[in-house]
Structure formats: C-alpha cells, structure tokens
C-alpha cells in the first residue's frame, strides 16, 4: 500500500479490507461476515425487531444477537449468518466464476 504524509501525519491508503490492513488471518472471511452482520442489523431496524424477537426469528439465542450487535460474530459461521438473513426475509445468491489470479477471492455484493 502506498504511504504519504498529510500535515505531518503518515497516511496509508486502505486495501478495501480493514481486516487485511490489520494483518488478521482469514481477512476475506471476516469482511464477508461483517457485511452479513451489517445487513442483519439493517433488517432488524427495518422490521422493528427487539433482540429477543430477532433471536427467535433467526433461530439463535438473544445473547448471540447481543454479541453480534456489539461486533462479536466469532461464534457464528458465515452459513449461520446467511441463514439468519434468510429468516429475516432476504434471498442470498452465491456466484462462482473462474479467476485469472492463482488464488480466487471471496466477495460480498449487497443489492
């Protein structure tokens, strides 16, 4: 990543994945999971659900919803987060295509 100085402070442009910028393992998966959680939060607000109501509808416990709302989604798999979105009225499409890179990438596209 390219670095530059602004008003004496070193600034580095993001790669587009804060988890990768922080050097965390499984950065692509963390980015996808955080995107799914953001959509779950939006759905809960749109539907006017309490954490307890959302938990019941998503098939998880209220403490797991609370953890999710605080940004801790380590105890939930990508698949479970997608299931939660399904239960909140979302369709999910998975698109697989070849890449020219030696290793493919995981991406989340929100419509």
Image: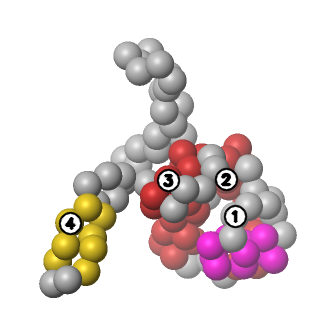
Instruction: State the image quarter where residue 69 is shown.
Output: bottom right
Element marked by disc 3: helix
**Which residue is disc 3 drawn over?**
20
Precedes in sequence: disc 2 or disc 1: 1
Precedes in sequence: disc 3 or disc 4: 4
**Which residue is disc 2 drawn over?**
81
Assess whether mark 4 and mark 2 are in contact (beta carbons under 8 angstroms): no
The reply to whether residue 89 is in sight is no
Q: Which residues are magenta?
A: 62-71
Position of residue 39 measured from the top left corner of the image (x, y, whole percent)? 51, 61
Position of residue 15 measured from the top left corner of the image (x, y, whole percent)? 36, 52
Position of residue 21 measured from the top left corner of the image (x, y, whole percent)? 45, 58
The reply to whether residue 108 is in sight is yes
**Which residue is disc 1 drawn over?**
73
Precedes in sequence: disc 1 or disc 4: 4
Real-space CA distance between mark 3 and mark 4, rounded to the nearest whole angstrom: 19 Å
Precedes in sequence: disc 3 or disc 1: 3
């Amino acid at each position: 990543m390219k670095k530059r100085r602004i008003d004496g402070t070193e600034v580095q442009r993001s790669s587009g994945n804060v988890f990768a910028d922080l050097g965390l393992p499984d950065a692509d998966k963390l980015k996808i999971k955080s995107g799914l959680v953001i959509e779950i939060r939006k759905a809960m607000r749109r539907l006017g659900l309490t954490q307890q109501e959302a938990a019941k509808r998503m098939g998880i416990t209220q403490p797991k919803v609370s953890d999710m709302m605080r940004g801790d989604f380590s105890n939930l798999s990508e698949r479970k987060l997608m299931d939660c979105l399904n239960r909140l009225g979302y369709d999910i499409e998975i698109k697989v295509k070849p890449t020219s890179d030696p290793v493919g990438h995981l991406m989340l596209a929100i419509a």
